[in-house]
């Protein structure tokens, strides 16, 4: 399988000297084309820091990220980020269609009419036809996040980086959005990296789960989720392989939470 | 005409009417041309309004020119300073100092460079209007939520594009506050500058009338200035509501 994204010995420290906080302690993993990879870990292990480093939004202290073989130093073409805070990541002065079209602001070779049509198409793909001329603040949280996803897809992405995109929506909406994301990932041939604190979500969505340790964070282990691409909210979650994977991930998060801090005497 | 609901509009009229009546009674009792009542002022307005309107034209033109110069220079500068945090923090004390300096105090300095003509007056007006504009724009741009920057960077916007497409619209609600203050300031200083650098305009008219003890005529001019101020303020508020519907979360289509 072609490797789309690779992290090698990624480390990040905030501050310097004795007060320095080592957040990432040398993270290595890779993601293949078309794969859906979830990243889970105990609270405060720097999941968002890691995702921002993968996105080129934040510089790592040491280590490298490569996207399609090229080192990532700034947000590369072909990578879209969906942020947790949808209400702030969308622009209230733009209609939903204009918000999505703005995802193509640095896409060359498209006329403004073509961008508008593409935005319309993406809004329909996320199930928001009829809301094109409304504004984000007129929509519910889940619908706003759909606009943000449509904007990501419109930017001609091949890799979607999802930073806890469903953490702020209610449980029922979350289940619907999980299936929508899986469906979109297949339809638009997206490679996806999902950062989440929700273990069930991580297992339900992913082909592979990368489990992180506590700070300074490294990869604890990876689990392949061999449940096929088609998932179902009821039957998949009852499958013994789903339950076994969930058990495995929860055990390792629990043990890294209760383990004595590495720095303690 | 006003954006107030009807009932509030009528209750807003009560106090001015009472004050006018009290004023008229006091003026009758004093019965001297040095203390004219609203009746005499109304007669002055009737007699002098062609002249007043002509003079106010000069005043408004210069106020508008000064405001425009200030807006074109200060709004982009404020956005830029918000982005260039170190330059901004170096310039901030100077801005704070300029904010406490009354605009008429800069008139002698401006006269050195620009004489006493229209350019000088427009410069003083632009100075006065520029202060609230840059203060508010800079503050808004400086305190933008970091998420806006993250989104801009992940969409691979250039710095200038981020400032034009994101920082500017996101700062507009606070810029609007600056605009309201700047418009009021421009009108005020336009009149003041005329009184100091006498040539034409309503300020000159006002000063002449007062020097000749034509108090009723002077008050007529003041009434006109107040009226213009009210109208301009109302227009600015309407424009703000229209442009910032997304900030006040108004559904303009459903409202009508």
Image: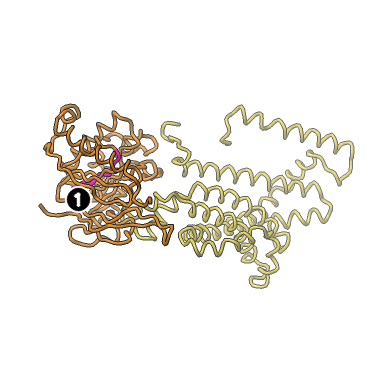
Chain colours: A orange, B yellow
In the depicted structure, whether residue A225 falls above or below residue B202: above
Q: Return the residue at label 1.
A: A158
Residue B103: x %, y % from top left: 67, 60
Range drawn in magenta: A191-197
Badge 1: chain ID? A
The residue positioned 74% from the left and 55% from the top of the image is B205
Position of A35 with respect to A119 (left or right) is: left
* In the foreground, A79 or A137: A79
Residue B23 location (% of width, % of height): 81, 37
Quadrant of the image occupied by residue A65: bottom left
Figure check: A89 above or below B204: above
Q: Is residue A157 left or right of residue A262?
A: left
Residue A252 lies in quadrant: top left
Using the image, determine if residue A121 lies above or below residue B197.
above
Left or right placement of residue A11 versus residue B27 in this view: left
Residue at 40% x, 43% y: name it: A92
| Residue at the image position 15 percent from the left and 43 percent from the top | A224
Please identify the residue farthest to the bottom as the structure is shown.
B112
Q: Residue A194 magenta-drawn?
A: yes
| Residue B100 visible to an observer of this rendering | yes
In the displayed structure image, the side of residue A162 where residue B186 appears, left or right: right
Q: Nearer the viewer, residue A30 or A145?
A: A30
Q: Position of residue A14 (x, y in %)?
A: 39, 56
- Res. A117 visible in picture: no
């Amino acid at each position: 399988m072609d490797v789309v994204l690779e992290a090698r010995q990624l480390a990040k420290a905030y501050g310097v000297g004795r007060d320095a906080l080592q957040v990432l302690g040398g993270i290595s993993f890779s993601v293949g084309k078309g794969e859906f990879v979830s990243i889970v870990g105990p609270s405060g292990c720097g999941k968002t820091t890691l995702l921002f480093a993968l996105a080129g939004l934040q510089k790592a202290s040491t280590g490298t990220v490569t996207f399609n073989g090229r080192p990532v130093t700034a947000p590369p073409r072909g990578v879209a980020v969906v942020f947790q805070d949808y209400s702030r990541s969308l622009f209230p002065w733009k209609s939903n269609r204009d918000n999505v079209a703005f995802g193509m602001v640095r896409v060359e070779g498209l006329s403004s009419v073509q961008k508008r049509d593409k935005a319309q198409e993406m809004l329909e793909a996320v199930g928001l036809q009829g809301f094109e001329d409304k504004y984000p603040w007129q929509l519910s949280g889940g619908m706003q996040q759909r606009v943000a996803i449509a904007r990501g897809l419109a930017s001609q992405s091949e890799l979607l980086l999802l930073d806890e995109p469903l953490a702020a929506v209610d449980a029922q909406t979350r289940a619907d959005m999980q299936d929508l994301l899986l469906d979109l990932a297949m339809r638009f041939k997206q490679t996806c990296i999902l950062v989440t604190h929700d273990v069930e979500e991580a297992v339900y969505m992913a082909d592979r789960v990368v489990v992180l340790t506590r700070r300074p964070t490294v990869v604890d282990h990876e689990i392949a989720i061999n449940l096929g691409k088609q998932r179902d909210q009821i039957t998949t979650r009852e499958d013994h392989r789903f339950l076994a994977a969930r058990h495995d991930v929860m055990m390792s998060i629990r043990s890294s939470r209760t383990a004595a801090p590495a720095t303690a005497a | 005409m006003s954006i107030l609901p009807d009932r509030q509009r009528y209750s807003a009229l009560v106090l001015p009417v009472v004050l006018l009546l009290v004023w008229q009674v006091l003026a009758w009792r004093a019965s001297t041309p040095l203390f004219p009542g609203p009746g005499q002022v109304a007669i002055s307005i009737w007699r002098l309004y062609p002249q007043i309107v002509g003079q106010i034209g000069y005043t408004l033109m210069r106020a508008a020119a000064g405001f425009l110069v200030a807006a074109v220079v200060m709004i982009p500068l404020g956005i830029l300073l918000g982005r260039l945090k170190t330059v901004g923090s170096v310039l901030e004390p100077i801005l704070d100092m300029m904010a406490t300096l009354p605009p008429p105090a800069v008139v002698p300095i401006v006269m050195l460079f620009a004489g006493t003509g229209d350019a000088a007056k427009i410069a003083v007006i632009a100075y006065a209007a520029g202060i609230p504009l840059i203060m508010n724009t800079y503050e808004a741009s400086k305190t933008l939520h970091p998420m806006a920057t993250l989104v801009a960077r992940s969409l691979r916007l250039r710095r200038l594009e981020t400032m034009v497409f994101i920082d500017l619209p996101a700062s507009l609600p606070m810029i609007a506050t600056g605009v309201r203050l700047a418009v009021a300031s421009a009108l005020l200083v336009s009149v003041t500058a005329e009184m100091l650098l006498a040539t034409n305009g309503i300020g000159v008219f006002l000063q002449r009338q007062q020097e000749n003890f034509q108090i009723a005529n002077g008050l007529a001019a003041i009434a006109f200035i107040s009226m213009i101020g009210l109208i301009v303020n109302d227009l600015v508020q309407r424009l703000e509501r229209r442009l910032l519907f997304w900030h006040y979360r108004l559904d303009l289509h459903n409202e009508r």
